[in-house]
Amino acid sequence: MDGEDAWIAWVRAQPLENIEYRRKIDAERIDLIAGIHPRHLAKPEEANARVAHRMGAAAVALGFPCEERVIETIASVRKAAPDARIVLSGFTNHENAGRLLALADGAFVGACFERCGRGGANEKDRVEAYMEIVRRVES
């Protein structure tokens, strides 16, 4: 793999087995966020979002290095599964967070808090600056 999708790991999706396992361990009250990238499920994000939402996912997760692709995918998922919550699964930073969070329902954030990117120590001023962006989007 190379290019934009080089960061994606191969995953074998097993939604029915996951539902059965959640019941077995009495974890149905725990919300799940479903990754909907086509590499994981071999269908377009829109179809994966509909299925994930129908199967009980609390939200769907999507993320790409290309901001334009994220925006387009959010729009297509909103159209296909209007009630699904969307969580950004990475690739937000201080520059794009306001634009992307205005369209999504949340985000997993990490590297933009770290001194040297992935693997560095979180810096308080980076976290505070990001949270100020979040507060502006929420108001």
Image (cartoon, helix red, strand yellow):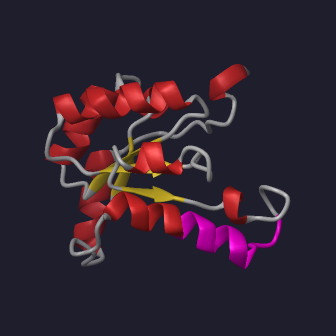
- Can you see residue 1? no
Percent x, y for residue 95? 61, 46
**Residue at point 81%, 62% (across, down):** 119
Q: Position of residue 68 (x, y in %)?
A: 49, 25
Q: Does the magenta segment cover residue 127?
A: yes
- Main secondary structure along the magenta-highlighted residues: helix
Percent x, y of residue 71: 41, 31
Q: Residue at x 35, y 22 (%)?
A: 44
Q: Is residue 55 above or below residue 10?
A: below
Please tell me whether residue 108 is drawn above or below residue 27 in the rendered image. Answer: above
- The image quadrant where one finds the N terminus is top right
Residue toward you, 25 or 139: 139
Magenta stretch in the rendered image: 120-131
Determine if the magenta segment contains residue 123: yes
* Residue in the picture at 52% in, 40% down: 11
Q: Looking at the rendering, which quadrant does residue 56 occupy?
A: bottom left
Residue 20 horizontal/vertical position (percent): 25, 60
Residue 138 image-quadrant placement:
bottom left
Q: Is residue 98 left or right of residue 83?
A: right
Residue 45 shows in this picture: yes
